Amino acid sequence: MVGGLRPAIVEKIEERSAKIYVKELGPVNLPWEKLRWARRELPDEKVDRSPAQASDIFTRGDVIYTVGNSADSLQFVQVPEAQSALVAVDPHDGAVVALVGGFDYFRSKYNRVTQARRQLGSAFKPFIYAAAFDKGFTPASVVLDAPIIFDVPGTEQSWRPKEDTDTFYGPVRLRYAMAHSINLVSVRLMRDIGPDYAWNYVQRFGFDKSQLPQNLTMALGTAELSPLQVAEAYATFANGGFKVTPYYIDRIEDAAGKPLFQADPAIACFECGRAGDPASLAVSGSRDDKSAGGARSAQLDLGVHDGKTLIPEKNLAPQILRPQVAYLLADMMADVIRQGTAQRARVLNRDDIAGKTGTTNDQHDAWFSGFNGGLVATVWTGFDQDRSLGADEQGAHASLPTWIYFMHTALADVPKRMVPVPDGIVTVRISPDTGLLAGADDPNGIMEKFIEGTLPKSEAYEGPNTNPESDKPLF
């Protein structure tokens, strides 16, 4: 058995059906609707035309693979050449709650979650946006989506970044650009805030500078990262701006149940603040509480007083983003699911999830990273030997369904867990066209969220709609 797939032998072929034998199930008939997807492989990574009859697919005596627990549910499948990896972490302390490093460990012991380094594509954009928000940009800031050409210094070559389609939207708000993954907006945004500033800024998420290209291509996700690094970084958006470190082993006990080891992770405690008064570090709960997806809560059981748990300063995770910036990015990524490239995830019927798709050039890598306030999961799909997955295999098609399948189980019967809302967030009506404050008589005005002090000008104002006074990073 390979990866849970059941081997079967083809006993008889009809014109548009086949009789197979499965050891655990016995004889099973496969109708045409379960066969017609198959294509024979051709040279140069191409596939043959659609089959016209069952004999175009296999011959008597062939060994095939199936999946399913009954004759009715049995499906004809193939052992995939492509690989996929999934990792899920608790954003409160970094506990790794699920990890799948590939299709079948016994066929390949290469752990793609921890060992693979692949380009991230558009799933990297939230980190560029975070840098921009600390430069005074807002979800309502308008950036141009139009063709652009950059000369490559020291050469006669030029770089022309592309969209996934030939459609250009002109001036667009950053919230819309995030939801629809508009490439040229990200490139212009990184250019506007400064490539060096962006390059230095994103390292706070835990990325090694050797993994980050020092040019504008970084805005399109040319950094090569592991799925674990990506999940760790996205946890910052889920927990209010804190940097947690993934860990795998919570506790080791001897045969008598005596603890030999107990993990001591840093905790992303949104409620704790950073005041010196010990009372400011008091939060309710205990280490045995459960959070979304079965992950433990973020509280340490270190001496309970009056029903509250005191967390020492050494156990508090460092805050690397202003909580307001982390919240706005999470809120914008919720729009990716509500109305953007990941709308397929709406099937989960939850309003507490957010995330971002990612696809690299020629569909070599497909990503989806998504989260709620209690669980972060990242999925990567691609070939070990770098090549295209196929023209239509973008993150929303190749990786998002895996994320949905996992989250459907991980969040089953788990209460809604929103990303925490910090103080300092205000909501006002803006013009969807200009991003400026909407007039009282504007029937098309929409609501938008801002950090206090970054409100745009009114529509009567004709200057830029960013706030230069907030052009100073907090950290």
Image: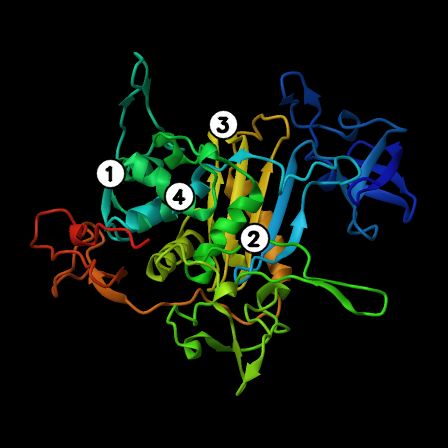
Q: Nearer the viewer, residue 367 or 287?
A: 287
The amino acid marked with disc number 2 is: Ala
Q: Nearer the viewer, residue 96 or 105?
A: 96
Q: CA distance from mark 4 to mark 2?
A: 20 Å
The residue that label 3 is drawn on is 362
Instruction: Compare marks 4 and 1 and give the one earlier in the sequence.
Output: 1
The tag on residue 192 is 1
| Residue 105 at x, y percent in the picture | 76, 41
Task: Residue at 28% x, 23% y: name it.
Answer: 150
| Residue 100 at x, y percent in the picture | 68, 47
Model colouring:
rainbow
- Residue 167, relative to residue 410: is it above or below? above
**Image marks 4 and 1: residues in contact by CB distance under 8 Å:** no
The residue that label 4 is drawn on is 202
Q: Quadrant of residue 58?
A: top right
Left or right position of 366 against 143 = right
The amino acid marked with disc number 1 is: Asp
| Residue 260 at x, y percent in the picture | 75, 63
Q: CA distance from mark 3 to mark 2?
A: 24 Å
Task: Residue at 91% x, 48% y: name it.
Answer: 24
Left or right position of 260 against 367 = right
Q: Quadrant of residue 437?
A: bottom left
Q: Residues within 10 Å of mark 3 (few under 14, many from 20)?
A: some
Q: Residues within 10 Å of mark 1 (few under 14, many from 20)?
A: few
The amino acid marked with disc number 3 is: Asp
